[in-house]
Amino acid sequence: MKTLFFTAMIGILIGASVSAKTMKSNYFISTTGQLTHYKRIAFKNNEVKVVLQNGEKLLLPMAQIKTIKANGKIYDKLPVYKNDKPTDKEAFMELVTTKRGLKLYKYYTDIDSDNREFGFNVSVDYKMENYVVFKDGQFKTEINDSNYPAIFTYFGLNYKYK
């Protein structure tokens, strides 16, 4: 009985160690579901340059990457919506928080003539913070000046109008 308990504890500790390493390390997940740990990653045009932990270098098409974890943040490639309508674009969106299956994401766009000039989400360097909510990979809503107080409160975030 003691041997069984000891073996179970070793298994739990090894599993926790592997899980902790995955949580702390940088990785990407391909569209096929393969998880790959990396040392460095860089984006240029539609390609991703990756240096693996063993020093091997890869050059991958951006289309093959589904999720990236970098510096403790998770970025999922999701469809971009504008005025709650789908566009033909995708972006890596930072996962901000989750609640009851809903995921709040943030991504940045440059301010151009199509975007409003003032709002809760315009930064001093003229980048627009865009927030969207997805559930199970499906778009739910785009955050705008009228709905952000309720949605941010729901997710437990404090956000002041700039």
Image (cartoon, rainbow, N blue to C red):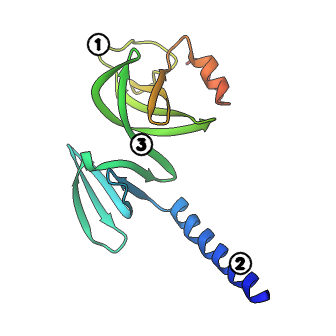
| Residue 25, numbered label | none
**Could you give the CA–CA distance between mark 1 and mark 2, rounded to whole angstroms?**
60 Å
Q: Amino acid at mark 2?
A: Met
Q: Is residue 124 shown above or below 39?
A: above
Q: Is residue 32 shown above or below 153?
A: below
Between discs 1 and 3, the one toward the N terminus: 3
The reply, left or right, for residue 17 in relation to residue 59 is right
Residue at mark 3: 76
Mark 2: which secondary structure?
A: helix
At 34% from the left and 35% from the top, the residue drawn is 91
Q: Position of residue 153 (x, y in %)?
A: 67, 24
**Could you give the CA–CA distance between mark 1 and mark 3, rounded to whole angstroms?**
27 Å
The reply, left or right, for residue 61 in relation to residue 21 is left
Between discs 3 and 2, the one toward the N terminus: 2
The reply, left or right, for residue 15 in relation to residue 1 is left
Q: Nearer the viewer, mark 1 or mark 2?
A: 2
Res. 126 image quadrant: top left
Residue at mark 2: 9
Q: Position of residue 58 (x, y in %)?
A: 24, 63
Residue at mark 1: 113
Mark 1: which secondary structure?
A: loop
Q: Quadrant of the C terminus?
A: top right
Q: Is residue 131 shown above or below 161?
A: below
